[in-house]
Image (cartoon, grey):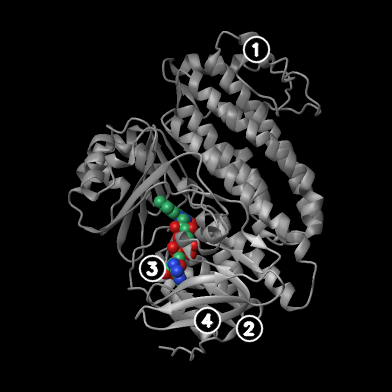
Amino acid sequence: MPTQHPVTPGGNYDVVICGGGLAGQTLARQLKLNNPMLSILMIIKSEMPLAWNDFKVGESTVEISAFYFSEVLQLQDYFKNNHYKKFGFRYFIGDSTGLPASRPEIGLSSYAPYDSFQIDRGVFESDLYFMNLLANVTIISGASVKSVALSDSGGLHTITYQEDDGKTMYEAQGRWVVDASGRRCLIQRSLGLQEAPETACNATWWRVKGRLDVDDLVPREHTYDDYFMRVANRSRFYSTTHLMNKGYWVWLIPLASGHTSVGIVTTEAIHPFDTYNTYEKSMKWLNIHEPVLYTHMQQFEIVDFLKMKNYSYGSKQVFSTDRWACTGEAGLFTDPYYSPGSNFIAFENSMITRMITDDINGEEDWKPRVAEYNDFIINMNKWLTRSIQSSYTYFHLDIVIALSFIWDVAAGWSFICPRMFNSIYLTREATTDMKEVTLRFFSMAYNVEDFFNEWKQLTPNNYTFSFIDYLSIPFLRKIYDRNVKKGKSTEQLKAANEQNLVDIEIFVQCLFWIALEDVYPEMTDLVSRKPWLNAWAITLDISSWNTKHLFSPDTPPADISETYTQLKSLFINRHKSIAAHVDDFNYSFK
Ligand SMILES: Cc1cc2nc3c(=O)[nH]c(=O)nc-3n(C[C@H](O)[C@H](O)[C@H](O)COP(=O)(O)OP(=O)(O)OC[C@H]3O[C@@H](n4cnc5c(N)ncnc54)[C@H](O)[C@@H]3O)c2cc1C
């Protein structure tokens, strides 16, 4: 085991990192990979290494965080050897009294081309701790930062900390100070930068010993052959599984340490926290809302239990030209529904690394980028939090939640993924080149979010499905293949960005027509014509079609028939026979 380097109380460092959870440890690694000569002090309240299988939430990764861990932090082999490869997201929707096999399912049928992982967080953070020690990061664990005195005159920042024996105070100086103290939010609180969440959402989570597999809720009988045969190896175990219904989702995540992580996440307005905020209450809650899972869980031994009330929050500023920055939950936190926590860490750490590297190299041009970096992180947090948390109210509506999921992944792969895979957020030139298209996308996205909220009020929820393998929808697969890809030139990125907006605009047209057929089935004439729309103005409020200029688009029409057919054919009307459904479908393109 490597020995710690002696700590100099009152020493000076290029960077002082307060906190050493996922955000702090990955930042230290990234900084050292970039510049091994950088002097870094990391002060961590928790005693390191953590217990071998210490329980920390945040296990599931998606393409962005997987790219960051594997490629930016060069941990590809480490992940392959120490953590599970993830079998994508999986959602079982609506009526929870039946078996998963009888609920509409969205998921993958085979592994996605780009690997992501289920991380055992306690294991990962302890392993990072040893890697960072070996890279000569000075680490003091079992010590709390008590205050951070920020210099606004170009001088050094002063960080005061105390070891857990409570006896001695130390002062360290840093040219840069990065707050990675998680929900302690040292800098945010002292500068009054935190913003309260718009919506209250809460969670409890715990681990059980052994393999809790959603497929074990379904008997291995011929009746369920379809259910088992539609996924690779007849197993969904390695997915991040969501069992969901109005106002909540319950996660199941497998961990390489031999445990399964289970969590309940709800919006307070529908499932108040005090109905499940202890382990006993959580089990009682499961018995009411997910009885099939509850019954199966009786045979599992609980390992630990944690909870969090009101988990999301925003911020007014996370980076400063005065050489301080916040990363991870020390800055802000969105909603965990799409596992974006590590994505934020990936972007924040990469921006911080870029600012610090430029500053230490004596370059000044990082300063004008700080405002853009702040805008990107803060606005992404606002957008995601708002759009995810409003969707909790339609988690039980088959067609609405399915198309909202497809919209979210199409948007994420098109406009967020390429930024990480090609580092385009790091240079002004690339972001400026792509800004106009990206802004047009976001103004459309806010309207689409309102559209889903209108739709949820009006839908009779007649349309349903058995299984949507989202990567096998050709238009979505094209978006994935185009964007989940590294090594593009700026020209290629620009071209892809423009094509993404074209594809997304077509998708939004289809979304409108499918929703219209669902809500106003009598409008057959209009639906059969499907005139090209102003995709920035879609609404189901007929009285505002004219004022919003819905039928006066300022973009040239494109052929939507292929995408429409791909999307519409995912659903069947539960009140009609298959033959009638096919008739309807043909009518749409007469
Ligand atoms: C319900 C839920 C589910 C989630 N699921 C996912 C998921 O599936 N995937 C995903 O990517 N993310 C997920 N997240 C988010 C993820 O948990 C966070 O992004 C991540 O844990 C944040 O890491 P961090 O390093 O910022 O904070 P932490 O991991 O909390 O680390 C904080 C560090 O600061 C130290 N510290 C605290 N106070 C002080 C002090 N005064 N002085 C010195 N050190 C201090 C602590 O000891 C610790 O080392 C989820 C979050 C929630 C709430």
Q: Position of residue 464 (x, y in %)?
A: 44, 26
Q: Which residue is drawn at 50% across and 28% down?
A: 400
Report, in whole angstroms, how far the alpha carbon at label 3 lies from the one at label 2.
26 Å
Q: Residues within 10 Å of mark 3 (few under 14, many from 20)?
A: many
Disc 1 vs disc 4: which is toward the camera? 4
Helix, strand or loop at label 2? It is: loop
Q: Where is residue 453 in the image (x, y as percent from the top left)?
A: 53, 27
Q: Which residue is drawn at 43% across and 40% down?
A: 200
Q: In this view, does 169 lie to the left or right of 344?
A: left
| Quadrant location of the N terminus in the rendered image | bottom left
Question: Which residue is under mark 3?
Answer: 122
Report, in whole angstroms, how far the alpha carbon at label 1 lies from the one at label 2.
63 Å
Helix, strand or loop at label 4? It is: strand
Question: In the image, is residue 471 above or below residue 541?
Answer: below
Q: How crowded is mark 2: few (under 14 residues within 10 Å), some or many (20 or more)?
A: some
Residue at the extreme left: 299
Q: Where is residue 245 in the image (x, y as percent from the top left)?
A: 37, 34
Question: Which residue is under mark 1?
Answer: 543
Report, in whole angstroms, how far the alpha carbon at label 1 lies from the one at label 3.
55 Å
Helix, strand or loop at label 1? It is: helix
Q: Which of marks 1 and 4 is nearer the N terminus?
A: 4
Pointer 3 and pointer 2: residues touching (CB < 8 Å)?
Answer: no
Asked whether 567 or 253 is in front, the reply is: 253
Asked if one can make out residue 60 in the rendered structure from this viewpoint, the answer is: no
Q: How crowded is mark 1: few (under 14 residues within 10 Å), some or many (20 or more)?
A: few
Tag 4: residue type?
A: Glu
Asked whether 85 or 234 is in front, the reply is: 85
Ligand 1 quarter of the rendering: bottom left
Question: Which residue is under mark 2?
Answer: 36
| Mark number, residue 171 | 4
Pointer 3 and pointer 4: residues touching (CB < 8 Å)?
Answer: no
